[in-house]
């Protein structure tokens, strides 16, 4: 019958792949040090091997750019934000990006509709699409 043991650790601050892990029973009948078999590696947030024990990844926005369509006063100005992440973010994961400090911008509300090919990857605060 299986024995399940659960314990908590804090991941290191440095990136690492899942290391080989071993168990050493005290009874010599087991034959000394034994390899622990890792379960299904799985893919989550676009990371292969996400579920491998002690695999450590870092979330970073690797590309963070904003541009505008015009600097001319009183004209409608389209702001384009480009973001790239080390993790695959989706609306299903309740990914929310807040852009602040748009000094002098006149908007109808605090939430604005997104446009562009990636708009379906985001949701409003609280998870609503």
Image (cartoon, rainbow, N blue to C red):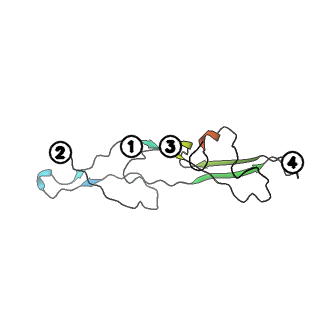
C-alpha span from label 2 to label 4: 72 Å
User: Contact, CB < 8 Å: mark 1 with mark 3?
Assistant: no
Query: Which quadrant does the N terminus fall into?
Result: top left
Q: CA distance from mark 1 to mark 4?
A: 52 Å
Number of callouts in the render? Answer: 4
Q: Secondary structure at mark 1?
A: loop
The residue that label 3 is drawn on is 46
Q: Considering the numbered disc 4 on the image, is that residue within a helix, a strand or a loop? A: loop
Q: Is residue 97 above or below residue 42?
A: below
For label 3, the crowd category at 10 Å Cα-Cα, with few meaning under 14, some 14 to 19 and many 20 or more, is: few
Q: Element type at marker 3?
A: loop
Find disc 4 in the rendering and name its residue: 75
Mark 3–mark 2 distance (CA, rounded to whole Å): 35 Å
First along the sequence among labels 2 and 4: 2
Between tags 2 and 1, which lies in front?
Answer: 2
Mark before the other along the chain sequence, 3 or 2: 2
Counting from the top left corner in percent of width and height, residue 5 is at 26, 54
């Amino acid at each position: 019958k299986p024995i399940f043991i659960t314990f908590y650790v804090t991941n290191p601050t440095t990136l690492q792949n899942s290391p080989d892990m071993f168990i050493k029973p005290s009874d010599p009948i087991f034959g000394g040090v034994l390899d622990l078999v890792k379960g299904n590696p799985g893919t989550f947030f676009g990371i292969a091997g996400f579920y491998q024990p002690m695999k450590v990844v870092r979330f970073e926005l690797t590309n963070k750019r904003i541009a505008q369509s015009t600097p001319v006063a009183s004209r409608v100005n389209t702001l384009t934000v480009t973001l790239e992440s080390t993790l695959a973010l989706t609306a299903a994961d309740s990914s929310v990006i807040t852009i602040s400090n748009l000094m002098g911008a006149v908007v109808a509300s605090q939430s604005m509709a997104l446009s562009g090919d990636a708009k379906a990857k985001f949701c409003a605060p609280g998870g609503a699409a």
